[in-house]
Image: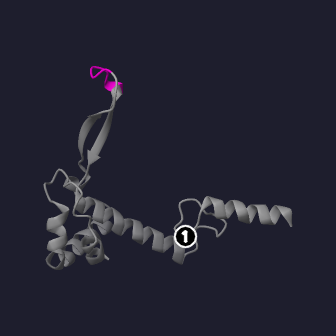
C-alpha cells in the first residue's frame, strides 16, 4: 500500500513545511517503503501521528477587493506529503474495516466509492413508485 502511494505521488505538487518534495519521495520509494510502513504502523498502534506531519504552512492568498481587508484573502494550507501518505493509509484501513464488517448499510450512498447520491435517488424513486 505505502509503495503504491509513493509511486503514484504527483511530482508537480508543492512540498510541505518539512521541505520534502513529492519527487524525492517518488524516486526513493523502493528505499522508503518499509521504514515508512513501519512508522505508519507504529503511529496507528500508538494512535499518534508525528507532529511534523500535522503542522501546515498556511499562506494567505489575495482574492479581490481592498488588500487591507482580511476577508479578501483565502488561506492555502500546505501539509507534509508524508502526512498525506499516512492519511491515505489510515483512510484505506478504515474503509476496509467498514466494508469487511458491513458497518454502512447498502442503502447509504453518500461519500462511498462507487456509489452516488443520484443512484440512491433513483433507487428511492423505484421503491416509491412500485
Residue at the spot of label 1: 114
Q: Position of residue 1 (x, y in %)?
A: 32, 77
Residue 14 horizontal side relative to residue 107, left or right? left
Would you place residue 23 above or below residue 3 in this image? Answer: above
Residue that protrudes farthest toward the front in the picture: 64
Residue 92 horizontal side relative to residue 123, left or right? left
Q: Position of residue 108 (x, y in %)?
A: 63, 63
The structure residue drawn at horizontal position 17% and vertical position 65%, both measured from the top left corner, is 23
Would you place residue 88 above or below residue 78 in this image? Answer: below
Q: Residues within 10 Å of mark 1 (few under 14, many from 20)?
A: few
Q: Position of residue 11 (x, y in %)?
A: 22, 63
Label 1 sits on a secondary structure element that is loop
Which quadrant holds residue 9? bottom left
The structure residue drawn at horizontal position 67% and vertical position 66%, both measured from the top left corner, is 107
Residue 38 horizontal side relative to residue 124, left or right? left
Question: Is 44 a magenta residue?
Answer: no
Foreground: 62 or 59?
62
Question: Is 68 a magenta residue?
Answer: yes
Which quadrant holds residue 15? bottom left
Q: Main secondary structure of the magenta part?
A: loop
Q: Which residues are magenta?
A: 66-71
Amino acid at each position: 500500500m505505502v509503495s503504491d502511494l509513493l509511486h503514484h505521488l504527483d511530482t508537480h505538487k508543492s512540498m510541505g513545511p518539512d521541505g520534502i518534495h513529492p519527487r524525492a519521495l517518488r524516486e526513493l520509494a523502493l528505499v522508503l517503503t518499509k521504514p515508512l510502513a513501519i512508522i505508519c504502523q507504529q503511529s496507528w498502534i500508538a494512535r499518534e501521528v508525528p507532529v511534523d506531519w500535522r503542522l501546515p504552512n498556511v499562506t494567505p492568498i489575495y482574492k479581490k477587493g481592498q488588500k487591507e481587508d482580511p476577508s479578501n484573502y483565502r488561506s492555502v494550507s500546505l501539509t507534509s506529503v508524508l502526512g498525506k501518505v499516512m492519511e491515505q493509509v489510515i483512510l484505506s484501513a478504515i474503509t476496509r474495516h467498514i466494508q469487511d464488517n458491513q458497518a454502512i448499510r447498502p442503502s447509504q450512498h453518500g461519500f462511498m466509492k462507487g456509489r452516488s447520491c443520484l443512484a440512491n435517488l433513483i433507487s428511492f424513486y423505484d421503491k416509491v413508485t412500485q
